[in-house]
Image (cartoon, grey):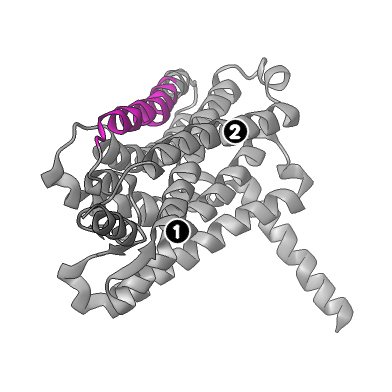
Amino acid sequence: MEINMEVRNETTIQEFILEGFPAIQYLGNIFFLMHLLAYLASITGNMVIIIITWADHRLQTPMYILLSTFSFSECCFITTVIPKLLSIFLSGRQTISFTSCLTQAFSFLFFGSIIFFLMAVMSLDRYLAICKPLHYPAVMNLRVSFLLAFFCNALSFILITGLVLKVSQLSFCGPNVISHFFCDLGFLIHLSCSDTGSVEIYVLFLALLVILISLILTIIAYSNIVVTIVRLPSAKERQKAFSTCSSHLIVLSLMYGSCVFIYVKPKQTNRLDSNREAALVNTVVTPLLNPVIYTLRNKQVHQALRDALSRVRLQKQSFG
């Protein structure tokens, strides 16, 4: 009997099934095309930000260094899950090995944590630039921005590695169907037949640390920015600043709202299914909006793009 149980355990933990969206699978081709276009647009927008930042010396400032790091993390973040989602829309439920499942979960949470930490850092950068302009050059420079980006990466790696190692030690001896389009650790923990109490406490701790602390810092920064904007003497300047801030806050609300719904809540098994829809917000919607909201509306970026296109045209004419 013990030998049979060991064989059964070894068999069931070797592979999981990603269910995806079975209720709308008959529309799989349509959703495949929609999400493929969204994915390509997100990758293109973020790659433009990265390339133009490093190609134009005028954009090699702390703000744009942080933005290019943010864009790189976002490309990695969505690439972790979207290709698998596209496969599910085309072929239905997909199988994934336990090792691949943990690797995907680690990558998703690692890059997601970097994005949240970077959003908090970028909010503080804007706070210093707008509310403390005289102190900004002394506080923020390229060296500091690189150190902050490194710190975001290092802290995320340490926190998420600890969580994934804890989950890897759990036993899985029951159902192996994950009702999601990627290996979400919440579902993996729910499928485990081990005592998951300590792991769930660690997940809640990480959610509070990564999401709520970065959210609080962002709220404090933007509150001070709004107060400063209100005090601007020119109505035109106030309107322009509020337009930029409001678009930023819409994206922040979408991302923070969906993640708080997924991760910062008590364990409720019957609500796990709704996590799929919430996860689509921060894996498809916000990555599509972020390049437009954060950078592509910026006049400096527009000018850099125009200059780059002009150089390309001149090169073509000279070769022609």
- Asked which secondary structure carries label 1, the reply is helix
- Residue at 45 percent across and 18 percent down: it is 224
For the image, the number of numbered tags is: 2
- Asked which secondary structure carries label 2, the reply is helix
209 drawn magenta? yes
Question: In the depicted view, which residue is nearer to us: 213 or 242?
Answer: 213
- Residue 129 lies, in percent from the top left, at 60, 25
- Can residue 243 be seen? no
- Can residue 261 be seen? yes
The crowd level at tag 2 (other Cα within 10 Å; few <14, some 14-19, many 20+) is few
> Please, which residue is most extreme toward the left here?
270
Q: Quadrant of the C terminus?
A: bottom right
Bounds of the magenta segment: 195-220
The type of residue carrying mark 2 is Ala
26 drawn magenta? no
Q: Are marks 1 and 2 in contact (CB under 8 Å)?
A: no
- Residue 26 lies, in percent from the top left, at 19, 78
- Residue 262: image quadrant is top left
Q: Is residue 236 above or below residue 291?
A: above
- Residue 111 lies, in percent from the top left, at 50, 45
The type of residue carrying mark 1 is Ser
- Residue at 27 percent across and 76 percent down: it is 28
Q: Which residue is mark 2?
A: 154
> Please, which residue is most extreme toward the bottom here?
320
- Residue 181: image quadrant is bottom left
Q: Is residue 117 above or below residue 226?
A: below
Choose mark 1 or mark 2, whichever is in front: 1
Question: In the depicted view, which residue is nearer to us: 210 or 228?
Answer: 210
Residue 100: which numbered mark, if any?
1
- 199 relative to 132 in the view: left or right: left
- Residue at 52 percent across and 35 percent down: it is 156
